[in-house]
Amino acid sequence: MAAEGVKTVDVAALTERVLRKYPAASLSTKASGFDFASGDLPADAKKWDRFRTRGFMTLDELIDLSRWKTGGRQDRNIERNSDVAVRAITGAATSVASQVPEEPALPIGILSSLSGVDLPTASTVMTVWSPERFGILDIRAWNVLRAVAPAAFSSVQSPAGNRRLFRLAEADLYLRLIREIAQRASMSCRAVDQALWVLGEKK
């Protein structure tokens, strides 16, 4: 079952709207201009081959990935997890993603049970596991989509600049939409989220 609140959204219609504003060719161009921190760590094939082969992540790997995503802000919380727990929960998430591929929020929700793993970090874990099927949930990308479809993408930022946490239904909507865009644009989901991130630089 899809996350609550998603069934009322017409993802196909949203895809049409996004691609009218940002055609496939322009998204590909934007994705090629992606540059964040130490580079595109989630797409580093050598680094993550073992995770993809095993189907689970170690605590050290999760710490490394979280540092890339959060700049080390969650180190203390991530380190509260045992290696056994990280292996079990990341393994459960990839297993569910394989068994129920049409429900992208399910593995994200499983991963968020780990200390220090919010929905954006959970989406990053799934993106390194399968960049074709998952992309990173990020406020920059979210705000680009919000500018195109404000009724579907609620604000996660107050006028004073305070941010609330993403909800699981929002992660589900985001992932369903970028999957549809990726299919229509002949891109990976990771490339779509990179393009949106670049588009959001000046938002």
Image (cartoon, rainbow, N blue to C red):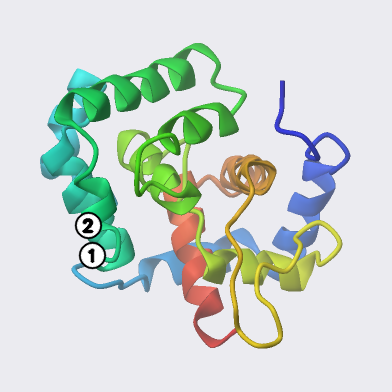
Q: Quadrant of the N terminus?
A: top right
User: Residue 182 is drawn in which quadrant?
Assistant: top right
Residue neighbourhood size for the residue with mark 1, other residues' Cα within 10 Å, grouped as few (<14), some (14–19), many (≥20): some
Residue neighbourhood size for the residue with mark 2, other residues' Cα within 10 Å, grouped as few (<14), some (14–19), many (≥20): some
Query: On the rendered structure, is 45 left or right of 31?
Result: left
Question: Residue 26 location, x and y as percent?
Answer: 56, 69
Query: On the rendered structure, is 84 left or right of 22?
Result: left
What residue appears at the point 22 percent right and 60 percent down from the top-left corner? 67
What residue appears at the point 17 percent right and 52 percent down from the top-left corner? 64
Q: Nearer the viewer, residue 184 or 149?
A: 149
Is label 2 in a helix, a strand or a loop? helix
Q: Quadrant of the C terminus?
A: bottom right
Question: Residue 65 location, x and y as percent?
Answer: 23, 51
Query: On the rendered structure, is 144 left or right of 47?
Result: right
- Amino acid of disc 1: Gly
- The residue to which callout 2 is attached is 75
What residue appears at the point 46 percent right and 53 percent down from the top-left corner? 120
Mark 2 to mark 1: distance in Å?
A: 5 Å
Label 2 close to label 1 by CB (< 8 Å): yes
User: Farthest top residue?
Assistant: 99
- The residue to which callout 1 is attached is 72
Q: Is residue 28 above or below residue 82?
A: below
Q: Nearer the viewer, residue 155 or 145?
A: 155
Question: Residue 121 location, x and y as percent?
Answer: 39, 50
What residue appears at the point 39 percent right and 15 percent down from the top-left corner? 95
Is label 1 in a helix, a strand or a loop? loop
Question: Residue 197 location, x and y as percent?
Answer: 48, 69
- Amino acid of disc 2: Asp
User: Residue 4 is drawn in which quadrant?
Assistant: top right
